[in-house]
Every structure is written in structure tokens, then in C-alpha cells.
Image: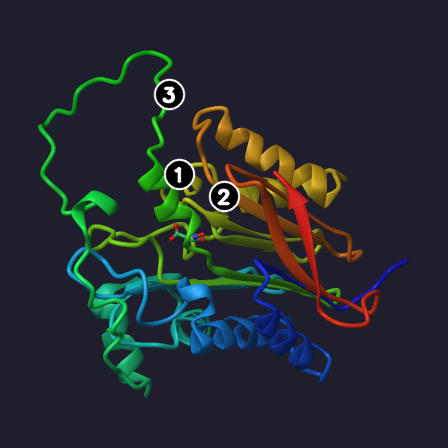
């Protein structure tokens, strides 16, 4: 049975899902709902992986990545490594609706936000001020010899326990809404102790999220440095366009990554315009996502095994 609208959101960030649901069921657009859901996570700093004060770069500064996509127009707006602005998803929406551009980055994204009236503030917290233990972080970065040594044929990535912790402890918030019209979005503070300037998959259309109004939408979470090499959200939506179910489409998107990166950690969630949904994951025991639709009496967390 067709059950629209539907809100699907990575991880058990149920308040964000409810926030998006309230908006989509009160005569607002899917884009409004995505913004509301991501904003909720930015404010409550879901799991420390969204919003200010967590997962700083090596210098201790938290920067934010976000994007929003409108399935009706195919417009996208995004910010990468925006500094000193807490409401990254709203700035991403302003990039989409108030410029002809798609992605603004760093200090210049901040300047754009200020110009149109966004407040700036310090994104440090007691948590982000803690100086990283070099043994437990990827930094400090030391320049690599150039040209880099050639990898052995068939190289396998060695995933240290620390690297696992780094990735698995950072989630982000991603939402796909569907009311016949589809919108998607992401908001995250990215990878902990990243090299300053690092931008993840989240603000990249087709990587962090992707929607097609005739098909549905998808969103990804996990090791963005790897994911953005595969555009898993675009791939999942493209597969769904050929009639593949959301579960199979997301599973194929994950498979395309682990073929090259067997130790990859991440997940993709997808929903089609019939309201069917599914997810696939790798590198963690299971992946929870939350959903609201007329088929569920309240926000529901679904766990898929990886
Ligand atoms: C990133 N994909 O910046 C994001 C963060 C994330 O689970 O989703 N972590 O790589």
C-alpha cells in the first residue's frame, strides 16, 4: 500500500525524524522538512556527530558540512567546512535558493552566511577543546613524501582499531522525505581530528544524498573520504530508477565500495516514491535508521544487519 509522506533518517536520531514529520504533515514542502530535521540534529548535536562542539579538526576547530537537494527542481545547495556558523543546513538551503551556485566552502561560506543575516558564533566546546592524543587520532598530519609510494597490486587497507573508533563513533544526520515530491539532505561535523580543510561526502550531491522526483532518494553515512569516490546515493537512486527495490539498491551501492575497500565502514538508506524503504551497511554489526510514515503509529527505528 502506498504510504506517503515518509521520512527516513540515518541512525536513531528520532527527534530529527519527528521534527521533519511535523513539518511535512503540516502543509510544508519536503525541502522544509529536510531543513527542520537537520536543524533539530544541529541544535541537539545528535550523538556529537552533527552540529557544533564535536569532532574538531586537528587544531580543535569544529567545522560543518551540509547539503540539501530539491527533487522538484533538481537544485542543490551545500556548504563544506563552514566555520563559526551553527546552522549549516540553513546556509546550504540559502546557497540553493539565493545563489546560482551549489557549494560554498570555508571562511567564504561563512562570509556569505553573514552577508544574508546568519549569526556567527564560536563552535568550540569543552569536548572539542581537548587536545587530540596523536595515538588515537589521524593527526597531526605529517607531509608525505612526493611522489607517494606506489601501492602494491591488490593492496588491502589495514584498518587499525583506532581508525575504526574514529569512524564508527561519528554519525551524521541524513533525511529523505517523500510526498510524491522528494527532498534529501545531510548535516555533519565530519571526521574527528581531520586535517583542517577536509570536506567529507556529506555536502557532495550523489555522495551524502541524492534525490530524483520520479524515483525516490538516498542518503549515506560513514567514511566519507571513501564514499565520495563512489557516489553511493546517486548509484542507489539510479538503480531504483530501473525498478530495483531500495534494499537491493543500497546493498549494491555498498558492494561497489567494498570491492575496493573491504574494510569500509558506512551505510546507505533509500526510499522510493511508493514509500518503500531499505538500507545496507558494512563494517559495523548493524545499522539503525528511523522512519515515520502513515504505516507507523510513531517514529520507528529499523535495524538492518551488516
Ligand atoms: C563524513 N560521512 O564526513 C560523514 C560523517 C559520517 O558517520 O557520516 N559519519 O565522512
**Is 129 left or right of 4, judged from the image as shown?**
left
Q: Where's residue 236, x and y in %?
A: 61, 42
Q: Residues within 10 Å of mark 2 (few under 14, many from 20)?
A: many
Q: Earlier in the sequence, mark 2 or mark 3?
A: 3
**Is 52 left or right of 228, judged from the image as shown?**
left
Q: Where's residue 276, x and y in %?
A: 77, 53
Q: Which residue is mark 3?
A: 156
Q: Secondary structure at mark 3?
A: loop
**Is 188 left or right of 150, judged from the image as shown?**
right
| Of the pair 5 and 121, the residue shown nearer to us | 121
Cβ of mark 2 under 8 Å from ligand 1: the answer is: yes
| Of the pair 131 and 55, the residue shown nearer to us | 131
Whether residue 272 appears in this view of the structure is yes
Above or below 274: residue 36: below
* Residue 85, quarter of picture: bottom left
Q: Which residue is mark 1?
A: 226
Q: Residues within 10 Å of mark 1 (few under 14, many from 20)?
A: some
Instruction: Judge depth for marks 2 and 1 and give the one in front.
Output: 2
C-alpha distance separating marks 2 and 1: 9 Å
Q: Which mark is residue 263?
A: none
Whether residue 77 appears in this view of the structure is no
* Residue 126, quarter of picture: bottom left
Q: Quadrant of the N terminus?
A: bottom right
Q: Which residue is mark 2?
A: 266
Q: Where's residue 196, x and y in %?
A: 19, 55
Amino acid at each position: 500500500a502506498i504510504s506517503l509522506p515518509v521520512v527516513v533518517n540515518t541512525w536513531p536520531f528520532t527527534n530529527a525524524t519527528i521534527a521533519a514529520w511535523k513539518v511535512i504533515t503540516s502543509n510544508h514542502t519536503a525541502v522544509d522538512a529536510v531543513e527542520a530535521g537537520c536543524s533539530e540534529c544541529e541544535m541537539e548535536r545528535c550523538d556529537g556527530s552533527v552540529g557544533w562542539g564535536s569532532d574538531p579538526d586537528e587544531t580543535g576547530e569544529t567545522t560543518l558540512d551540509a547539503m540539501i537537494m530539491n527533487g522538484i527542481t533538481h537544485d542543490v545547495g551545500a556548504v563544506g567546512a563552514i566555520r563559526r556558523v551553527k546552522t549549516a543546513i540553513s546556509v546550504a538551503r540559502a546557497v540553493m535558493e539565493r545563489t546560482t551556485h551549489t557549494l560554498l566552502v570555508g571562511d567564504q561560506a561563512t562570509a556569505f552566511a553573514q552577508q544574508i543575516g546568519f549569526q556567527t558564533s564560536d563552535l568550540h566546546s569543552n569536548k572539542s577543546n581537548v587536545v587530540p592524543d596523536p595515538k588515537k587520532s589521524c593527526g597531526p598530519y605529517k607531509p608525505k613524501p612526493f611522489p607517494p609510494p606506489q601501492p602494491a597490486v591488490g593492496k588491502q587497507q589495514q584498518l587499525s582499531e583506532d581508525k575504526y573508533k574514529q569512524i564508527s563513533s561519528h554519525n551524521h544526520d541524513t533525511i529523505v522525505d517523500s510526498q510524491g515530491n522528494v527532498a534529501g539532505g545531510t548535516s555533519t561535523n565530519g571526521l574527528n581530528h581531520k586535517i583542517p580543510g577536509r570536506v567529507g561526502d556529506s555536502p557532495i550531491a550523489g555522495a551524502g544524498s541524492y534525490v530524483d522526483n520520479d524515483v525516490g532518494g538516498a542518503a549515506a553515512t560513514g567514511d566519507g573520504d571513501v564514499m565520495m569516490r563512489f557516489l553511493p546515493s546517486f548509484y542507489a537512486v539510479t538503480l531504483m530508477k530501473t525498478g530495483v527495490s531500495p534494499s537491493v539498491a543500497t546493498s549494491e551501492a555498498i558492494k561497489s565500495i567494498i570491492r575496493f575497500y573491504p574494510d569500509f565502514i558506512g551505510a546507505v538508506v533509500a526510499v522510493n516514491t511508493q514509500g518503500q524503504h531499505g538500507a545496507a551497511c558494512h563494517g559495523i554489526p548493524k545499522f539503525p535508521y528511523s522512519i515515520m510514515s502513515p504505516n507507523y503509529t510513531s517514529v520507528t527505528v529499523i535495524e538492518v544487519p551488516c
